[in-house]
Image (cartoon, rainbow, N blue to C red):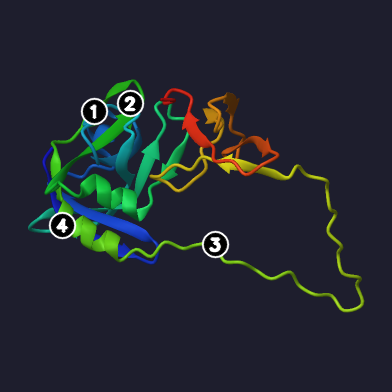
Amino acid sequence: MPLEFTSFTYHDGSYSLRFRSDEEIISLFERHTGDGQIGEWFTCALDNDQDFTVGHAMIYSLVGGVDFEGISEIKGYNYVVNAHFYKTTPDRSTQTELLKPAIQRLLADKSSIPCKLSITAFLYDAYYSKTLQLPVDQVLTEVARHRERLAQWQPEPIVIGRSPLVPRIEPLPLYSDRLQIIDNDTGRPRGYVAYVVKRSDGYLEHGETDFNGLTHEVMSLTRETVKLYLDDSVP
C-alpha cells in the first residue's frame, strides 16, 4: 500500500503528520478477512535503525496513532497522525519524549527519514505499508517553532497569623553533595543505572542511582573534584 505525504505541522504543543492513501486503512482487515483490527500506528525512524517490526524497540522514533480525516474524490483517503518524538529503552519499559536539541541532532545530516504504517489484527501477522519518505526540512522547520515548557517556580503562599516555618538544620560534613545523571536526549534523570564516582586520589565508589538519577552522598573534609562515570565507561 503506497502512502503519500501531505504535511507536517506543529500547533499548541503537538505535532500533526498528514498523509494520503488510495485505500481505506482503518477497517482494512475487517473488509478483507472479516476480523476486526487492533490498531494502526505510523512510525518514522530517526537514526539508522529501520526495523519497523511490531514488537521491536526502535530507540529513536517519531510515532503516533492514525485517525481518519476525510475523503478526497481525486486523491483518496486522508489521515492524520498525532506524532511524538520518542526515545525508547531496549526492553520497551520506558518511552520518553525527546528534547528539541536531540531531535535536531538526529536529523541534522538527513534529507528525509523513512516511515511506515503498521496495522495489527487478531490471529494475523501485522501488515506494513510501503515506505514513505518524510522530508526533514519541513520537520525541522516545525520543530524550531516548538517552545519547550519549563517548570516555573511558585512562591510559597503566606498565611496571615501562622508562624513561619523554621527549617530544621541537620549536622553535615564540611563538604557533601549528591550527583545526578541526566539523559542528554530527554533531559530526564536516569534512574537505577550503575555508576562509579572517581575521587581525586583515584579511589572508586560504586553505586546505583535512585529514581531521580541521584547518586549516594559524596562526602569530603576538604574541597575535592570528583568524576562521575557510568559503570561501563570508567577510564
Residue at position x 70%, y 39% in the image: 221
Left or right of residue 119: residue 134: left
Residue 59 at what x, y percent from top left? 34, 34
Secondary element type, mark 4: helix
Residue type beneath disc 2: His
Front residue of 180/192: it is: 180
Residue at position x 85%, y 54% in the image: 168
**Residue placed under numbered mark 2 in the picture:** 56
- Nearest to N terminus: mark 2 or mark 3: 2
Secondary element type, mark 3: loop
> Can the viewer see residue 4 in this picture?
yes
Figure quadrant of the C terminus: top left
Between the residue at mark 1 and the residue at mark 2, the CA separation in whole angstroms equals: 7 Å
Local crowd at mark 1 within 10 Å, few (<14), some, or many (≥20)?
Answer: few
Q: Quadrant of residue 48?
A: top left
Q: In front: mark 2 or mark 3?
A: 3
Q: In front: mark 1 or mark 3?
A: 3
On residue 151, the disc is: 3
Whether tag 3 and tag 4 are in contact, CB under 8 A, the answer is: no
Whether tag 2 and tag 3 are in contact, CB under 8 A, the answer is: no
Residue type beneath disc 3: Ala
Residue 14 at what x, y percent from top left? 37, 59
Whether tag 1 and tag 2 are in contact, CB under 8 A, the answer is: yes
**Residue placed under numbered mark 1 in the picture:** 51
